[in-house]
Amino acid sequence: MPLRSAGRGRQRDHLQGVSRVRTVARIVVVLVTIGWLVGGWALPAASPPRPAAKPTVDWTGLKVTFLAIGQGEATLLQWSSGETALVDTGAAEARARLFALLEEAGVRRLDWLILSSDMPEAAGNAQAVLDAYPVEALVFPALTRQVVLPPRIPEGIRLVALTAGQRLHLNRGTILTALHPRPPLSLSPQNNALVFRLAYGDVRFLFTGSINAEAEAAILAANPDLRSAVLKVSDCGSAQGSHPDFLAAVDPEVAIVFSRGEEGDFGREEVLERLSDSWADIYQPSRHGSVAVITDGLQYQVVLDGLRAGQQELSLEKEKTR
């Protein structure tokens, strides 16, 4: 008997097995087709795709949401105890987007409306917000009262005019401290903006309005400790502000940079580079969507449209190793 290659024999047996499987498969297909035509068998319907649920994040304490309105600056403050505040209202062109985001956040009333200045990027929708929502108190810089207040103030609203050094308790555990402006009135309108530190427990937020380097230097001279975990960068990231000395004094872990829109962000790249040199984590609502910082007063989390961007333990004495 001639010798046979074991490999070829196994290959032949394998091919014969495949042939038998294919024959059985053809018979099954034919029977199913006949049953469908004659007996009216129904093929199983494909399940419709399930919509992806938007992630949610449970929180207790204070949630500060830098709203992605596209043009200008607007920040929503919400406490788990139920109070709400709005810092600035964005440009008039962003009105529809602002109201849509407030609706999405479940805002029905405002305990505080805080206007940092009369600049279009900050106060463009101030009157519209006052007309649309019940507002308990309106906060503004005292030096620019005549220009920053909207023309129609509904009756019953408490007016709170602030100058540097004054403190305001927004609710139990949340203190707003005005750092700027102080007399005399600056010839540069943007340098008359309200700058304030918001402290919730051990976590600090610094809101710098629309100021430039001149006002930053004045704030540095009057305040030896500006360190804050979160910095709202001045004037939509204009290169006239965010001086390296000021950024070094604030030493932010998180920096939020709003936008005027595609045509108005002059010098923005220079400021982003300065912030990068400071090792801050940079978030731009125009690119990342609304950015929320949630804190219980001891630590905080950054959340992007319901997704955790990371949890940070607050340590103002931390060693930066990034």
Image (spheres, grey):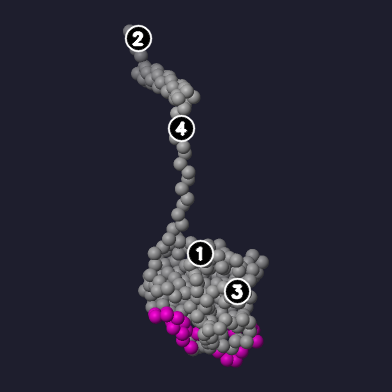
Amino acid at dot 1: Glu
Where residue 297 sits: x, y (%)? Answer: 38, 75
What's the amino acid at mark 4?
Answer: Leu
> Where in the figure is residue 269, as x and y percent of width and height?
59, 68
| SS at badge 2 | loop
Up/down of 56 relative to 226, above or below:
above
- Residue drawn at x 46%, y 79% is 198
For marks 1 and 2, the one nearer the N-term is 2
Q: Against 79, is 307 above or below?
A: above
Alpha carbon of mark 4 to alpha carbon of mark 2: how far?
Answer: 54 Å
The first of marks 4 and 1 along the sequence is: 4
Of residue 218 and residue 155, the one placed in the foreground of this image is 155
Contact? badges 4 and 2 (CB < 8 Å): no
Find out whether the residues at labels 3 and 2 contact each other: C-beta distance under 8 Å: no
Of mark 3 and mark 2, the one earlier in the sequence is 2
**In this rendering, which labeled residue sits more in front, label 1 or label 2?**
1
Return the disc, 4 or 2, that comes first in the chain's sequence.
2
Residue under label 2, please give it: 2
Residue bearing the label numbered 1: 104
Query: Which numbered tag is attached to residue 128?
Result: 3
Mark 2 Cα shell of 10 Å, populated few (<14), some (14-19), many (≥20):
few
Residue closest to the eye, 129 or 232? 129
- The Cα–Cα distance between marks 4 and 3, rounded to whole angstroms, is 56 Å
Question: Which of the 4 image quadrants contains residue 294?
Answer: bottom left
